[in-house]
Amino acid sequence: MNFKRFVLAVLGAFASVFVFEMLWHGFLMKGMYEATMSVWRPESECNMTVMLVSQFLFAGVLAYIYTLIGSKLPCKRGVAFGFFAGLILGVPQLATYCYLPIPLSISLMWVLASIVKCTLVGMAIACIYKEK
């Protein structure tokens, strides 16, 4: 593993995750969350540090997995890597509809968010980490 490229890939993936999550959940889904406020923690109880650590670890794990299985593949294969990682992470989000009192549309948006986010992050990791 090329440690310098790995660190850059993690940082690029983290930036991608952070921006995506902010846009997707902070803007696109904001109305859905406001309509179901009784289900969520009050904003005063939300811990941004935990969120940032979670996003950083997510980026690091995806980048590490890519170094194990995809580093010798062409950059465009990062799209497939990310897409399938998104499916793996997204499909279980559908089950949240079964145990949380939320509309099905929120669960479906979470599935789509996982797929889109991981596809973008996979592409970023692949382009940053690619073998020279």
Image: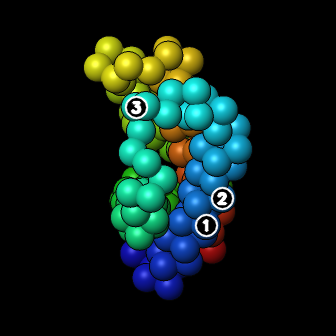
Examine the rendered structure and indicate whether residue 88 appears above or below residue 18: above
When asked about the image quadrant of residue 88, the answer is: top left
Residue 55's mark?
A: none
**Residue found 38% across the figure and 19% down from its top:** 101
Q: Which mark is residue 15?
A: 1
In this figure, which colouring scheme has been used for the structure?
Answer: rainbow
Res 116 seen here: no
Q: Amino acid at mark 2?
A: Val
Label 2: which secondary element: helix
Q: Image height check: is 80 above or below 4?
A: above
Q: Are marks 1 and 2 in contact (CB under 8 Å)?
A: yes
Q: Quadrant of residue 54?
A: bottom left
The mark found on residue 19 in the picture is 2
Residue 115, image x and y in percent? Answer: 55, 35
Residue lying at 64% horizontally and 39% vertically, measured from the top left? 30
Q: Nearer the viewer, residue 115 or 110?
A: 110
Q: Residues within 10 Å of mark 3 (few under 14, many from 20)?
A: few
Q: Name above or below for residue 74 compared with residue 67.
A: above
Camera-nearest residue between 84 and 20: 20
Say what amino acid the circle numbered 3 marks. Answer: Val
Residue 76, percent across and down?
Answer: 67, 48
Instruction: Report the quarter where the N terminus lies.
Output: bottom left
Sequence order check, earlier mark of 3 and 2: 2
Which numbered marker is on residue 39?
3
